[in-house]
Image: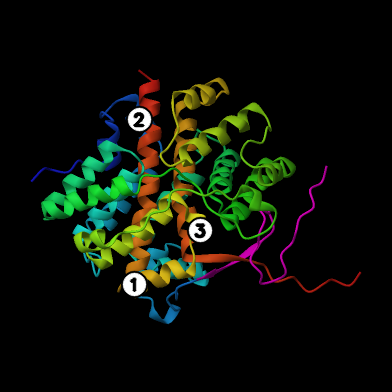
């Protein structure tokens, strides 16, 4: 069954979880490139991030941004053993779905879809919520991520047991924990410093 | 003055050097090192700017308390005391933890198909007494911290305006936001690792 998507008008505030590309507009003024010191550039870590209003706002505290960026990179892209990238992005998506960050969920659902090639199942997580029944491996990752996201955290022995029964070793379980924990950080910044907007539509190609 | 452990997450989780859990954490060495650097950038900054060390640790103790993590709360309360906070301020922070007790995440979505998932929860606002005990600026930061911790999807431009009205500058608001959001990460890594450690005994 295909669920109809209510696409927000360009520039309007999205009101549904989606894998579409969304914009994000800050509620506070980011720094301009001309204002960046050496310390700010180091805080951005990648110079291309100077094009992002989100990172140009966060770079106002460059030491924190630098450490945060490097934490993020290792958690999500250090794939020496442990949890596959797709499942790390699944954890990020489940956390974002639970906290209600439509923007974060859109980005990481797309990454989960690209890395897993299971776009329809990722979409079901967005449409149906975190109680969705996909398969036991994915259900275990989602359940652990959601439990850790609760305040106070509700992650316990049953979640570890379930992940182990699903075939995950302790490094993979650490990756679930860190991916989910990191998205609690990311969601709170994206939700409180600005808002998502529907991406401007591309010019229609002639048919 | 107590010597600080080299890694706060290890200290709060009780990771022993050379243990299986230590090895697992070190397999993600850059994440381990930069989580610690994030802590240091927030709580041992070379230039605290307009967010004092006492204010930083007061917020941290509040956030840890909202997560019902007594060991982490004790760590940040000790740090608050070591930073020179008065017993009165420490008592005020602990009183706000009790007043702010809630379960999350809750909140509202923009109107539409997600409205069925709208969820009310225990709201928090500092009283006149809180403001007197914490100071107006810090009390407003506590209100913002509660929003971020328990129901970030209810965040708004107005919430940021309230911080500005209380005297917080833009760069300081970024620091406050990073501090609260980092703690929601750190506390969850500690909670997850503690469970994993217990599951491995």
Chain of the residue displaying label 1: A
Q: What is the crowding at mark 3: few (fewer than 14 residues within 10 Å), some, or many (at least 20)? A: some
Question: Image point 20% across, 46% down: which residue?
Answer: B77
Q: Which residue is mark 3?
A: B154
Chain of the residue displaying label 3: B
Q: Which residue is mark 2?
A: B194
Along the line of sight, the residue nearer the viewer: A74 or B39: B39
CA gap, disc 1 and disc 2: 39 Å
A105 relative position to B103: left or right: right
In the rendered structure, which disc, 3 or 2, sits on the residue that comes first in sequence?
3
Q: Which residue is mark 1?
A: A38
CA gap, disc 3 and disc 2: 30 Å
Image: B101 above or below B158: above
Q: Position of residue A159 (x, y in %)?
A: 49, 27
Classify mark 1: helix, strand or loop.
helix
Image: B154 above or below B196: below
Question: Image point 45% across, 59% down: which residue?
Answer: A189
**Number of callouts:** 3
């Amino acid at each position: 069954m295909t669920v109809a998507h209510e696409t927000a008008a360009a520039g309007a505030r999205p009101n549904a979880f989606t894998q579409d590309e969304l914009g994000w507009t800050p509620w506070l003024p980011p720094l301009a490139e001309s204002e960046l010191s050496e310390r700010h550039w180091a805080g951005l870590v990648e110079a291309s991030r100077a094009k992002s209003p989100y990172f140009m706002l966060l770079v106002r505290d460059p030491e924190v941004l630098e450490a945060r960026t490097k934490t993020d990179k290792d958690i999500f892209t250090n794939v020496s053993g442990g949890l596959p990238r797709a499942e790390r992005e699944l954890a990020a998506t489940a956390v974002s779905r639970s906290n209600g960050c439509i923007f974060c969920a859109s980005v990481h659902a797309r990454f989960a879809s690209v890395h897993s090639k299971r776009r329809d199942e990722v979409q079901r997580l967005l449409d149906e919520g975190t109680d969705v029944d996909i398969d036991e491996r994915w259900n275990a990752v989602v359940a652990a991520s959601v439990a850790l996201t609760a305040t106070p955290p509700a992650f316990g022995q049953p979640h570890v047991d379930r992940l182990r029964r699903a075939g995950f070793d302790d490094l993979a379980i650490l990756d679930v924990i860190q991916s989910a924990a990191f998205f609690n950080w990311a969601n709170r910044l994206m939700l409180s410093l600005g808002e998502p907007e529907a991406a401007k539509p591309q010019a229609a190609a002639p048919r | 003055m107590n010597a600080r452990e080299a890694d706060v997450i290890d200290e709060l989780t009780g990771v022993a050097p050379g243990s299986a859990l230590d090895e697992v954490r070190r397999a993600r060495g850059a994440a381990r090192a930069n989580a610690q650097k994030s802590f240091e950038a927030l709580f041992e900054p070379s230039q605290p700017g307009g967010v004092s060390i006492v204010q930083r640790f007061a917020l941290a103790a509040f956030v840890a308390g909202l997560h019902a993590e007594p060991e982490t709360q004790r760590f940040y309360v000790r740090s608050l005391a070591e930073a020179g906070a008065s017993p009165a301020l420490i008592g005020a922070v602990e009183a706000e933890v009790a007043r702010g007790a809630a379960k999350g995440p809750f909140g509202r979505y923009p109107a539409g198909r997600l409205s069925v998932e709208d969820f009310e929860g225990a709201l928090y606002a500092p009283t006149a007494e809180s403001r007197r005990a914490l100071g107006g600026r810090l009390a407003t930061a506590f209100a913002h911290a509660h929003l971020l911790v328990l129901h970030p999807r209810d965040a708004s431009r107005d919430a940021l305006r309230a911080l500005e009205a209380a005297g917080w500058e833009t760069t300081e608001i970024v620091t406050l936001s990073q501090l609260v959001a980092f703690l929601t990460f750190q506390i969850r890594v500690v909670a997850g690792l503690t469970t994993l450690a217990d599951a491995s005994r």
